Image (cartoon, rainbow, N blue to C red):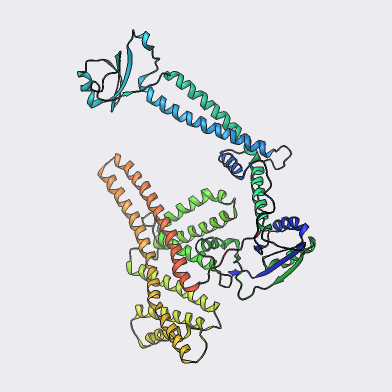
Amino acid sequence: MSIRPLFKVTLIGMLEEKARALDALQSLGLVHIVPLASRPPEKPPEDLGVTPEQLRLALQYLGSCPSKRRQVVTERHFDLVDVVHKVLQKRRRRLKLEEQRDALVKRIRDLTPWGSFELPGEQGLYGQRLWFYLVPNYRMKEVEKADLVWSVVHRDNRLTYVAVIAEDEPRTNQMPVPRTHTGSIPLEQLEHQLQDIEIELELLDGEREADTRWLYLLQRSLAGNADAAERAEVAEQTLDRDGVFAIQGWVDTGKESELNAFAERNGLALLLHRPADDELPPTLLDNPQALSGGEDVVRFYQMPGYRAWDPSRVVFFSFATFFALILSDAGYALMLALVLGFYWKRMGASDTGQRLRILGATLSVFSLVYGVLVGSYFGAGPPWGWLESLKVLDVNDFDSMMNLSIFVGAAHLIIANGINAWRLRGRLPAIASGGWILVIIAGLLLWQLGGSAIIYALGALGLLLVFGCSSERRGRDAKTLLLRVFDGLLALTGLSSMFGDVLSYLRLFALGLASASLALTFNQLAGEVATALPGMGVLLEVLILIVGHLLNFVLAVVSGVIHGLRLNLIEFYNWSLSDEGYLFQPFAKREVNPWIT
């Protein structure tokens, strides 16, 4: 686990070659740009005939198509403006048709109980008209008492569909409810309109699927538009003087040879030097692909500073451990693995997805192993005898599980202080971190073995190291000594924080017990229902088991993620990482890869 060392790089070239040099530098994709100046853009971005928002809408419309065609990767027959405008026109037409279809579906559903009919008009009934009412069944007695000519057209469990024949609309006191408007279009005609709209929607679906062949080129156009905007922004940040421009940034020291070759190839002067003590370079994390999922967890909360250390790998494994302790069930671990397997290929489409799926696989493996060790399978015991022999822990043994949680927390904080001591080696605060390690060990021994002179001496030595080595003030005058004493006393107040942080790991035991208890409760409830209701009870038993365990699985996974992250990003960071940095973001062109269907 490491944070890559960086060079500060300055590239100098002729002003007339600036645009070409920036384009080449963006293609290289190695340098994190540092602004040397700020000024308004020299010229507006290139007009492509469509806006980025139109491009994004077209991509969203085509990307949501379930089936996609083989991608066109050359621009021989591609007209960006024509394709985007036609796609957006079809999108607008589709939205309008979907609104009409939804309105027709509702209208047909409302008219179906009345049947298919066509209003005869005033002359057809000799001046009489039809008035329609939806009367609640319990109010039909009021209709029967009214002096009106009416007939029941349809009746369901809630409403009676009543048609009244009268020259004028009945008064409000004659009918118990307001009249219903059925419209003048017959049901049969509405059904024909719906059929026509659905046919047109199918045609639009076919055209959308055909247009998906342009997805790659549209994505490339959008990426090119964003790249051009970023180049224009960087062009405003260069220092331009007397026909010469200079651009500055940070680069990985391992890329020095590539940068030298780039400068020579493009006729640029290159200056490289180490960062000064008062400079704060960006943070470039370097981890193996298999463990890089920890980087995403670290970035989620706080990026370590350039001169700090990379906690990605420690966070990777400790997060998996805490998640397993909270899930506490081998059956749920298998469910998590199934969900991950379902999305495995889709997650592999991006670098972030590849990292997260490895992290998810690690969570599944750790949870499965721990679930086997506690012998919990969807809240039940081991289904086979050989699995029973692997059970070495009991989640209902409160004393053992509390001890396990406290020891896990203490070990986590010992690692945090040990890493901090190694990072600060050669300085007094490193000894203070060692003192905190002694305090944690002494506290554990006192809890498990009781008081003894050796344990008290160990704890006192740790507190003495914290008191004496937490300050780096230099000097022997009275004021400096007094301030050092004050710093030491202030550091000792961290004892209560340390005690609280260790006890905070009891949440692992509490959440694991809650998950196991809920699983057991759902199993017992399902069994009782099956016993109490022969026949129908079996169906209810299956329903309770499925819904109950799905709910418990979701709650356990959410708890594992939230509290697993919290213990890493709050308690662990509090004792090992204080410097906050910012991410290394290279000036690079966006990559767009066509997929094969």
Residue occupying image coordinates x 46% and y 70%: 572
Count all numbered tags in the image, as a single digit: 0
Residue 138 is left or right of residue 552, and the answer is: left
Q: Answer with the quarter of the image where residue 329 lies.
A: bottom left
Q: Where is residue 7 shown, x and y percent of the image?
A: 67, 70
Q: Answer with the quarter of the image where residue 452 lies.
A: bottom left
The C terminus lies in quadrant = top right
Q: Where is residue 585 shown, x and y percent of the image?
A: 62, 61
Return the residue nearer the eye: 244 or 279. Answer: 244
Return the residue nearer the eye: 365 or 354. Answer: 354
Q: Is residue 449 above or below residue 219?
A: below
Q: Is residue 415 above or below residue 517?
A: below
Q: Where is residue 509 shown, x and y percent of the image?
A: 37, 65
Residue occupying image coordinates x 61% and y 72%: 279
Q: Is residue 213 above or below residue 371?
A: above
Residue occupying image coordinates x 45% and y 30%: 102
Residue farthest bottom in this picture: 477
Q: Where is residue 284 shown, x and y percent of the image?
A: 61, 65
Return the residue nearer the eye: 517 or 145. Answer: 145
Q: Is residue 386 visible?
A: no
The N terminus lies in quadrant = bottom right
Residue 560 is left or right of residue 37, and the answer is: left
Return the residue nearer the eye: 552 or 120. Answer: 120
Residue occupying image coordinates x 48% and y 59%: 363
Q: Is residue 543 visible?
A: yes
Q: Is residue 331 above or below residue 253?
A: above
